[in-house]
Image (spheres, rainbow, N blue to C red):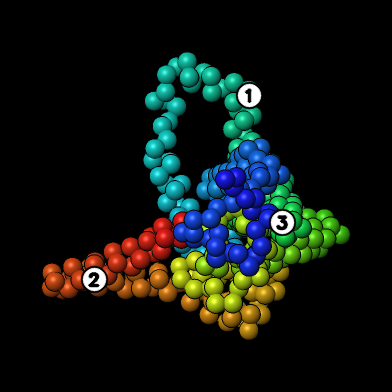
Amino acid sequence: MAMISCSDVPCSSLAAFGGDADQRCSFNEDSDIAGIGVLLSFIIYGAVTFLISAYIFFFVTDGFASELTNTLDQKVVETTKSLTQMLRKGPEALPVEYAQSRALHWTTSFKHTLADSDTLSQIVVMLSDQQLVLGFSMLIVGYVKFVTMTEYHFAIVSALSNISFVVHVSTIPVVVRAMFDKDKADAKWYNFKRLWRAIAKIVFDILLFISFVPTGNSWWLANYGLPTYCIWRNTKGNYNGVSTRTMIADMVLLCWGVAYELHAFFPIFAEDASASRLLECAVSVLLVPRHLHSWTQSKAEKPTSPLLRYVVHLLQWILWAVIVLGHVDQQ
C-alpha cells in the first residue's frame, strides 16, 4: 500500500499520525529551507561571525563597549590574556628562519590588521547585519508558508533563526563600540544607524518568540511531515511536560537577550530606576540555579561531616542530571 502524503492528512487526524501511531505519511523536501547550501551558509557565517567577535572580545584593545560587560566578563578576559601571554614564546626562542619570516611585510600587515579594532569591528558590523537579514528572511518564509510547511521544516526555521539571534547578540558589544560611539560617529547618522537596527531587531525577536510556541506542544515533531498549521489548531490541553518547560526556558532566555539589546541600543533604559529594578528582578530569577550551586558549593567546602559533604555533592549531581535528562527526553 502506498504511503499517504502528509499534505492530504487533515488536522483532525493529528492523533492518528502522531507519536507511536502506526500510520505514517510522506513529505517532500524543501531546498529553500533545508537545502545543504542554506544550512552551510548559516553555520559557516554564524561561526565566522562569532569567532571574530570572540577574538575582539579577548585580544583586541578597546574593541568592544566595556559598559556592556560585567565583572565576570572582565575577569574572563584578563585571565585569557594572562594565559595566552604565558603560552606565547619570545622571538629569541624561535629558529632564525622563522624569526626572519616574521619580518616580512605581509605578515606584519596581517598582524597589524588583527590588532586594529576599527578594521575588525567594521567586519563584525557587516557580518552582524548579515545575520539579522538572514534570520529575518528565514522567519518570514516560515510564517508565509506555515499553512503548508511541515513541522520538520518549521523546526529548522526556528533553529536557524535562533542561531542568528545568538550570534547577533554576541556581536552587540562590538557593534555598539564601532557604530554607536558618539565620539566616532557622524552626528546626523548616529540615531539613524541605531534606530533602524533596534527596530529591525525587536521585530525579529518578536517573530522568533512566536516561533517557539509550537515547540512546546506535546504533538510537536510527533510526525515530521504534518503541517505546522495543525499544531496551531491543537493547542488546548496539549502544553505540558518537558517540551513545554523547554519552550518556557527558551522564551525566558530570549527575553533576557532582548533586555540586553535594549540596554545596548537605548542606554536610557539603564538610567531609568523602574526599568532597572524590573531587569534586576528578572536577572535574579534567572540566576537562581547559579545561587543554588554557589550555596551547595560553599556548604561542601566548609569543614563539616563527611556525610553532609556527600549529601551536598549528591544534590549537585541530581540537579545536573535532571537538566541533562530533560534535554535528552526533549530530543
Kindly identify the residue that appears in the image at 49 percent across and 73 percent down.
240
Number of other residues with Cα within 10 Å of mark 3, as a class: few under 14, some 14 to 19, many 20 or more: some
Kindly identify the residue that appears in the image at 52 percent across and 18 percent down.
100
- How many angstroms separate mark 3 from mark 1 (CA)? 54 Å
What residue did someone put label 2 on? 312
Number of other residues with Cα within 10 Å of mark 2, as a class: few under 14, some 14 to 19, many 20 or more: many
At label 1, the amino acid type is Trp
CB-based contact (under 8 Å), mark 3 and mark 1: no
The x, y position of residue 254, in whole percent, is 59, 66
What residue did someone put label 1 on? 106
The x, y position of residue 286, in whole percent, is 48, 72
Q: Secondary structure at mark 1?
A: helix
- Closer to the chain start, of discs 2 and 1, is 1
Kindly identify the residue that appears in the image at 64 percent across and 53 percent down.
6
188 and 2: which is toward the camera: 2
Q: Is residue 42 left or right of residue 284?
A: right
- Closer to the chain start, of discs 3 and 2, is 3
What residue did someone put label 3 on? 148
Q: Which mark is residue 11?
A: none
Is there any visible trace of residue 108 in the rendered image?
A: yes
At label 2, the amino acid type is Val
- Closer to the chain start, of discs 3 and 1, is 1
- How many angstroms separate mark 3 from mark 2 (CA)? 51 Å
The x, y position of residue 205, in whole percent, is 68, 64
Q: Is residue 111 left or right of residue 189?
A: left
| Residue at the outermost right position | 188
Q: Secondary structure at mark 3?
A: loop
